[in-house]
Image (cartoon, rainbow, N blue to C red):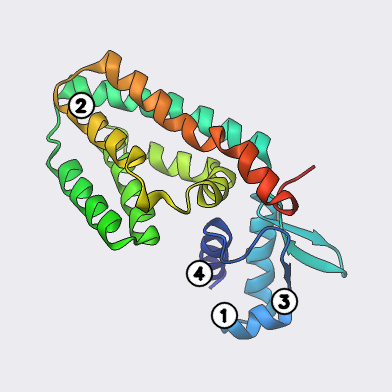
Amino acid sequence: MSDRVHDELMSAIRDLRLEPGALLSEAELSVQLGVSRTPLREAISRLVDQGLLSVVSQVRTSVALIDLSQAREACFIRRALETAAFQQACESGGDVGELRRILLRQEQAVADRDVEAFFVSDEDLHQEIFRLGGYPGLWNVIQRSKLQLDRLRRLAFSETVITRDVIDEHIRIVDLLENRDVEEGIRVITVHSRHVLDQAGRVQSEHPGYFTP
Protein backbone atom coordinates (compact mmCIF):
# COMPACT_ATOMS: atom_id res chain seq x y z
CA MET A 1 0.00 0.00 0.00
CA SER A 2 2.84 2.38 0.86
CA ASP A 3 4.50 1.58 -2.48
CA ARG A 4 1.32 2.38 -4.39
CA VAL A 5 0.88 5.69 -2.60
CA HIS A 6 4.53 6.56 -3.14
CA ASP A 7 4.34 5.82 -6.86
CA GLU A 8 1.12 7.78 -7.34
CA LEU A 9 2.44 10.84 -5.52
CA MET A 10 5.84 10.64 -7.23
CA SER A 11 4.16 10.52 -10.64
CA ALA A 12 1.94 13.49 -9.79
CA ILE A 13 4.94 15.51 -8.63
CA ARG A 14 7.12 14.54 -11.59
CA ASP A 15 4.53 15.49 -14.21
CA LEU A 16 3.53 18.68 -12.33
CA ARG A 17 -0.02 17.69 -11.44
CA LEU A 18 1.27 18.62 -7.99
CA GLU A 19 3.10 21.87 -8.56
CA PRO A 20 6.35 22.88 -6.81
CA GLY A 21 5.56 24.58 -3.53
CA ALA A 22 1.98 23.26 -3.32
CA LEU A 23 0.78 22.61 0.23
CA LEU A 24 -0.53 19.11 0.93
CA SER A 25 -2.98 17.94 3.53
CA GLU A 26 -2.47 14.45 4.95
CA ALA A 27 -6.18 14.23 5.74
CA GLU A 28 -7.17 15.13 2.17
CA LEU A 29 -4.56 12.84 0.62
CA SER A 30 -5.70 9.97 2.82
CA VAL A 31 -9.24 10.35 1.52
CA GLN A 32 -8.23 10.90 -2.12
CA LEU A 33 -5.92 7.88 -2.19
CA GLY A 34 -8.15 5.69 -0.05
CA VAL A 35 -5.47 4.81 2.51
CA SER A 36 -4.88 5.22 6.21
CA ARG A 37 -2.35 7.67 7.62
CA THR A 38 0.33 5.01 8.24
CA PRO A 39 1.11 4.01 4.62
CA LEU A 40 0.65 7.64 3.58
CA ARG A 41 3.26 8.83 6.07
CA GLU A 42 5.63 6.06 5.01
CA ALA A 43 5.30 7.19 1.40
CA ILE A 44 5.78 10.84 2.37
CA SER A 45 8.94 9.97 4.25
CA ARG A 46 10.38 8.26 1.18
CA LEU A 47 9.47 11.22 -1.02
CA VAL A 48 11.21 13.56 1.42
CA ASP A 49 14.35 11.42 1.11
CA GLN A 50 14.07 11.71 -2.68
CA GLY A 51 13.87 15.48 -2.49
CA LEU A 52 10.30 15.69 -3.79
CA LEU A 53 8.49 16.69 -0.60
CA SER A 54 9.36 19.04 2.22
CA VAL A 55 7.96 18.50 5.72
CA VAL A 56 7.99 20.89 8.64
CA SER A 57 7.02 18.70 11.59
CA GLN A 58 3.46 19.28 12.79
CA VAL A 59 3.20 22.36 10.57
CA ARG A 60 3.01 21.58 6.87
CA THR A 61 3.88 19.24 4.04
CA SER A 62 4.61 20.76 0.67
CA VAL A 63 5.92 19.77 -2.74
CA ALA A 64 9.63 20.54 -2.83
CA LEU A 65 10.88 23.24 -5.16
CA ILE A 66 12.96 22.27 -8.19
CA ASP A 67 16.68 22.15 -7.48
CA LEU A 68 18.56 23.14 -10.64
CA SER A 69 21.87 21.81 -9.34
CA GLN A 70 20.32 18.35 -9.01
CA ALA A 71 18.81 18.68 -12.49
CA ARG A 72 22.25 19.49 -13.93
CA GLU A 73 23.80 16.54 -12.11
CA ALA A 74 21.09 14.22 -13.42
CA CYS A 75 21.68 15.48 -16.96
CA PHE A 76 25.39 14.67 -16.60
CA ILE A 77 24.64 11.17 -15.32
CA ARG A 78 22.14 10.47 -18.08
CA ARG A 79 24.42 11.74 -20.83
CA ALA A 80 27.42 9.77 -19.60
CA LEU A 81 25.48 6.52 -19.30
CA GLU A 82 23.45 6.92 -22.48
CA THR A 83 26.46 7.64 -24.69
CA ALA A 84 28.13 4.53 -23.25
CA ALA A 85 24.99 2.47 -23.89
CA PHE A 86 24.77 3.85 -27.44
CA GLN A 87 28.34 2.79 -28.13
CA GLN A 88 27.64 -0.71 -26.82
CA ALA A 89 24.46 -0.92 -28.90
CA CYS A 90 26.42 0.04 -32.02
CA GLU A 91 29.03 -2.60 -31.31
CA SER A 92 26.44 -5.32 -30.73
CA GLY A 93 24.48 -4.37 -33.85
CA GLY A 94 21.07 -4.76 -32.25
CA ASP A 95 17.80 -4.63 -34.18
CA VAL A 96 16.39 -1.07 -34.24
CA GLY A 97 12.89 -2.26 -35.17
CA GLU A 98 11.42 -1.33 -31.79
CA LEU A 99 13.03 2.11 -31.98
CA ARG A 100 11.38 2.63 -35.37
CA ARG A 101 8.00 1.66 -33.90
CA ILE A 102 8.50 4.12 -31.05
CA LEU A 103 9.33 6.86 -33.57
CA LEU A 104 6.02 6.17 -35.30
CA ARG A 105 4.22 6.62 -31.98
CA GLN A 106 6.03 9.92 -31.52
CA GLU A 107 4.97 11.08 -34.97
CA GLN A 108 1.37 10.26 -34.04
CA ALA A 109 1.72 12.18 -30.77
CA VAL A 110 2.96 15.19 -32.75
CA ALA A 111 0.02 14.91 -35.14
CA ASP A 112 -2.43 14.60 -32.23
CA ARG A 113 -0.71 17.32 -30.15
CA ASP A 114 -0.71 14.80 -27.33
CA VAL A 115 1.94 15.97 -24.86
CA GLU A 116 1.57 13.01 -22.51
CA ALA A 117 1.91 10.45 -25.30
CA PHE A 118 5.00 12.24 -26.53
CA PHE A 119 6.69 12.15 -23.12
CA VAL A 120 5.86 8.44 -22.71
CA SER A 121 7.30 7.57 -26.10
CA ASP A 122 10.38 9.68 -25.39
CA GLU A 123 11.06 7.68 -22.24
CA ASP A 124 10.47 4.44 -24.14
CA LEU A 125 12.95 5.39 -26.85
CA HIS A 126 15.79 6.19 -24.49
CA GLN A 127 15.07 3.10 -22.41
CA GLU A 128 15.29 0.96 -25.55
CA ILE A 129 18.77 2.30 -26.27
CA PHE A 130 19.90 1.00 -22.89
CA ARG A 131 18.30 -2.37 -23.61
CA LEU A 132 20.05 -2.60 -26.96
CA GLY A 133 23.31 -1.68 -25.25
CA GLY A 134 22.89 -4.65 -22.92
CA TYR A 135 22.27 -2.62 -19.75
CA PRO A 136 18.48 -2.42 -19.25
CA GLY A 137 18.85 -2.07 -15.48
CA LEU A 138 20.73 1.21 -15.85
CA TRP A 139 17.50 2.90 -16.92
CA ASN A 140 16.18 2.39 -13.39
CA VAL A 141 19.28 4.13 -12.03
CA ILE A 142 18.67 7.06 -14.34
CA GLN A 143 14.98 7.22 -13.46
CA ARG A 144 15.83 7.60 -9.79
CA SER A 145 18.40 10.31 -10.47
CA LYS A 146 16.40 12.49 -12.86
CA LEU A 147 13.26 13.36 -10.92
CA GLN A 148 14.23 17.04 -10.69
CA LEU A 149 15.28 17.02 -14.34
CA ASP A 150 11.92 15.55 -15.36
CA ARG A 151 10.05 18.36 -13.62
CA LEU A 152 12.23 20.97 -15.34
CA ARG A 153 11.68 19.21 -18.65
CA ARG A 154 7.90 19.28 -18.22
CA LEU A 155 8.06 23.03 -17.75
CA ALA A 156 10.56 23.64 -20.52
CA PHE A 157 8.98 21.56 -23.24
CA SER A 158 5.25 21.66 -22.65
CA GLU A 159 5.00 22.67 -26.31
CA THR A 160 7.29 19.89 -27.59
CA VAL A 161 4.63 18.14 -29.64
CA ILE A 162 4.13 21.15 -31.91
CA THR A 163 7.83 21.38 -32.84
CA ARG A 164 10.08 19.04 -34.80
CA ASP A 165 13.44 19.59 -33.09
CA VAL A 166 13.34 16.79 -30.55
CA ILE A 167 11.79 14.14 -32.77
CA ASP A 168 14.17 14.95 -35.64
CA GLU A 169 17.08 14.36 -33.28
CA HIS A 170 15.52 11.07 -32.20
CA ILE A 171 15.31 9.98 -35.83
CA ARG A 172 18.94 10.98 -36.30
CA ILE A 173 20.03 8.99 -33.25
CA VAL A 174 18.22 5.86 -34.45
CA ASP A 175 19.69 6.23 -37.96
CA LEU A 176 23.19 6.58 -36.51
CA LEU A 177 22.70 3.55 -34.27
CA GLU A 178 21.57 1.48 -37.25
CA ASN A 179 24.63 2.65 -39.19
CA ARG A 180 26.89 2.03 -36.17
CA ASP A 181 28.25 5.57 -36.29
CA VAL A 182 29.47 5.85 -32.70
CA GLU A 183 31.26 9.19 -32.94
CA GLU A 184 28.42 11.12 -34.56
CA GLY A 185 25.84 9.39 -32.36
CA ILE A 186 27.61 10.46 -29.20
CA ARG A 187 27.79 14.02 -30.52
CA VAL A 188 24.04 14.12 -31.29
CA ILE A 189 23.10 12.57 -27.93
CA THR A 190 25.28 15.14 -26.16
CA VAL A 191 23.56 18.03 -27.94
CA HIS A 192 20.15 16.43 -27.43
CA SER A 193 20.67 16.01 -23.69
CA ARG A 194 21.47 19.70 -23.19
CA HIS A 195 18.24 21.14 -24.57
CA VAL A 196 16.37 21.13 -21.28
CA LEU A 197 19.21 22.88 -19.42
CA ASP A 198 19.46 25.43 -22.22
CA GLN A 199 15.87 26.39 -21.37
CA ALA A 200 16.43 26.53 -17.60
CA GLY A 201 17.03 30.29 -17.42
CA ARG A 202 13.87 31.10 -19.37
CA VAL A 203 11.76 28.67 -17.36
CA GLN A 204 13.08 29.96 -14.05
CA SER A 205 12.27 33.55 -15.02
CA GLU A 206 8.73 32.49 -16.04
CA HIS A 207 8.16 30.42 -12.86
CA PRO A 208 10.41 31.90 -10.17
CA GLY A 209 8.33 30.43 -7.36
CA TYR A 210 8.99 26.89 -8.57
CA PHE A 211 12.73 26.89 -7.93
CA THR A 212 15.03 26.83 -4.94
CA PRO A 213 16.87 30.11 -4.30
Who comes first in sequence, dot 3 or dot 4? 4
* Nearer mark to the viewer, of 1 and 4: 1
Pick whichever, 161 or 182, lies toward us.
161
Q: For the residue marked with disc 3, what is the amino acid?
A: Glu
Mark 2–mark 3 Cα distance, whole angstroms, equals 48 Å
The local crowd at label 3, few if under 14, some if 14 to 19, many if 20 or more residues have their Cα within 10 Å, is some
Mark 4 is surrounded, within 10 Å at the Cα level, by few (under 14), some (14 to 19) or many (20 or more) other residues, namely some
Report the residue marked by disc 3.
Answer: 26
Quadrant position of the C terminus in the picture: top right
Contact between labelled residues 4 and 2, with CB atoms less than 8 Å apart: no
Q: Residues within 10 Å of mark 2 (few under 14, many from 20)?
A: many
Numbered label attached to residue 4? 4
Which residue type carries mark 2? Leu
Q: CA distance from mark 3 to mark 1?
A: 10 Å
Whether residue 44 can be seen here: yes
Q: Is residue 106 above or below residue 191?
A: below
Which residue carries the number 2 mark?
177
Kindly report the distance in space between the C-alpha atoms of the residues bearing marks 2 and 1.
43 Å
> Where is residue 8 shown, x and y percent of the image?
52, 68
> Looking at this rendering, what residue extends furthest in the top direction?
183
Identify the residue at image location x=52%, y=32%. 75
Please, what secondary structure does the residue beneath circle 2 have? helix
Disc number for residue 33: 1
Reading the chain from its start, which is encountered first: label 3 or label 1? Answer: 3
Q: Residue at x 54, y 56 (%)?
A: 14
Give the residue displayed 47% in from the left and 34% down from the top.
195
Q: Are marks 2 and 1 in contact (CB under 8 Å)?
A: no
Binning the other alpha carbons within 10 Å of mark 1 as few (below 14), some (14 to 19) or many (20 upward) gives: few
Q: Earlier in the sequence, mark 2 or mark 3?
A: 3
Residue positioned 23% across, 51% down in the render: 107
Is residue 78 visible to us here?
no
The amino acid type, in three-letter code, at marker 4 is Arg
